[in-house]
Image: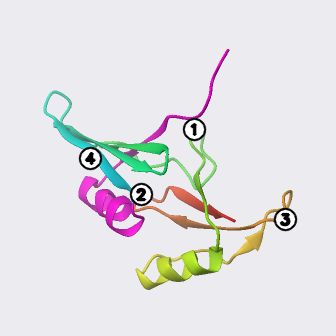
Amino acid sequence: MNLSTIHHVAIIVSDYQKSREFYVEKLGFEVIRENYRTDRDDYKLDLRLGEAELEIFGIASAPARPNYPEACGLRHLAFKVDQIEKVVAELQQMGIETEPIRKDTFTGEKMTFFFDPDGLPLELHE
């Protein structure tokens, strides 16, 4: 088997416009393509961050996350950063709350969590 990298991660969001603004305007993802699919009555937004892609499906009728944060399926998305304190300050200036910065138990690297509009945990990892 010759898997080389992860191509994309896909998430389903309940409020398409709010999530689009969060990921594009606040976190700085680049829009690759954006489509409304009439046959499914949903939006599909393809985003890029570096070489990774994030697919966002806007489905208003999707069920909420069953519990926080330990449900089967995607646990969280993690972003590599160079200066975690700087990124945390930028998020807080935009009104995005973060948990306190702490050290990863196993790697000793700095990390923290914040959340997207649907409560999906997002991690910053230095």
Q: Residue flagged by tag 4: what amino acid is it?
A: Ala
Q: Is residue 119 above or below residue 60?
A: below
Measured in 3D between alpha carbons, the distance from the residue under mark 3 to the one under mark 2, in whole angstroms, is: 29 Å
The residue sitting at 44% across, 43% down in the picture is 53
User: Which element is circle 4 on?
Assistant: loop
Measured in 3D between alpha carbons, the distance from the residue under mark 3 to the one under mark 1, in whole angstroms, is: 26 Å
Residue 49 image offset from top left, x and y in percent? 45, 52
Q: What residue would you read off at disc 1?
A: 73
Q: Are marks 3 and 1 in contact (CB under 8 Å)?
A: no
- How crowded is the residue under tag 4: few (<14 C-alpha within 10 Å), some, or many (20+)? some
Q: Are marks 1 and 2 in contact (CB under 8 Å)?
A: no
Q: Residue flagged by tag 3: what amino acid is it?
A: Gly
Sequence-wise, which precedes: disc 4 or disc 2? Answer: 4
Give the mark toward the camera: 3 or 2.
3
Q: What residue would you read off at disc 2?
A: 118
Q: What residue would you read off at disc 3?
A: 108
Q: Is 111 on the left or on the right of 114, as rendered? A: right
Measured in 3D between alpha carbons, the distance from the residue under mark 4 to the one under mark 2, in whole angstroms, is: 11 Å
Numbered circle sitting on residue 53: none
Q: Is residue 126 magenta?
A: no
- How crowded is the residue under tag 2: few (<14 C-alpha within 10 Å), some, or many (20+)? some
Sequence-wise, which precedes: disc 3 or disc 1? Answer: 1
Numbered circle sitting on residue 60: 4
Q: Is residue 101 above or below residue 27?
A: below
Q: Are marks 4 and 2 in contact (CB under 8 Å)?
A: no
The residue sitting at 40% across, 80% down in the picture is 94
